[in-house]
Image: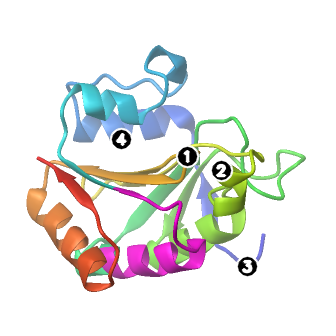
Amino acid sequence: MNNTKYIEIHRGRVARMLNACWPEFGVSLSRPSQYGWLANVFFEMDVPHIWRSNTRIPESRFWHVFAIAASKASVNGRIIVFHDGHAGWRGDGRGEVSRFLALDGVDVAVDFMKKRAYYSRSQWEYGRKSDNYYLFFPDEKMLAAFTHHGEFYCFSRNKDMLLAMGKTFFRNRLSVKYSF
């Protein structure tokens, strides 16, 4: 798979890791329809987050700035990537790639998302295949959500981390909105 090192991870383990970070949620990844999509759980609990719409910028520009912002916010360690299970991963017509993967580092995760996620302008503008995608940073207790409408949300109780990411977006002439 394009020389990307990844480890398949079980849905139950990801749910336990999410619940360890946010125990009051009781998140179950086997029944996302209960909330519509996973980010709604975070909205319900009023978790601080930043938001932006990516519908008017090239996908490559967003991913470049996101990687810089995550690095400036001192995000490191293993990152869990997953999707809601609607469109899956690009180029994965035979179920070759697990829905839940652990990747080493921001650059590897961003590269994987650029190549494999249906998260691009052409997908949401022209009604093509799409999905909601997530990057979960267990060490930082942070969840980045990418919607099938081209929106980006980053949830964390660490407001300083969110501010650092937001400032990096602003320095790169991309606006974000804060909700905290």
Q: CA distance from mark 4 to mark 1?
A: 27 Å
Circle 1 residue: 149
Q: Quadrant of residue 76?
A: bottom left
Q: Label the magenta part by its dominant secondary structure.
A: helix
Q: Earlier in the sequence, mark 2 or mark 3?
A: 3
Say whether marks 2 and 3 touch (CB < 8 Å): no
Please tell me whether residue 9 is drawn above or below residue 137 in the rendered image: above
Q: Image check: 81 left or right of 163?
A: right
Is residue 26 shown above or below 89? above
Q: Disc 4 or 1, which lies upstream in sequence?
A: 4
Work out whether mark 2 precedes mark 4 in sequence or the reverse, and give the earlier one.
4
Q: Is residue 82 visible?
A: yes
**Crowding at label 1, few (<14), some or many (≥20) Cα neighbours within 10 Å?**
some
On the rendered structure, is 89 left or right of 18?
right
**Residues marked 3 and 1 touching at CB (< 8 Å):** no
**Residue under the image location 51 percent in, 80 percent down:** 61
Q: Are marks 2 and 1 in contact (CB under 8 Å)?
A: yes
Which stretch did the figure color magenta?
52-69
**Residue 101 counted in the magenta span:** no
**Amino acid marked by disc 1:** His
Residue 105 seen in the figure: no
In the rendered image, the vertical position of residue 113 relative to residue 143, given as above or below: below
Mark 4 = which residue? Answer: 17
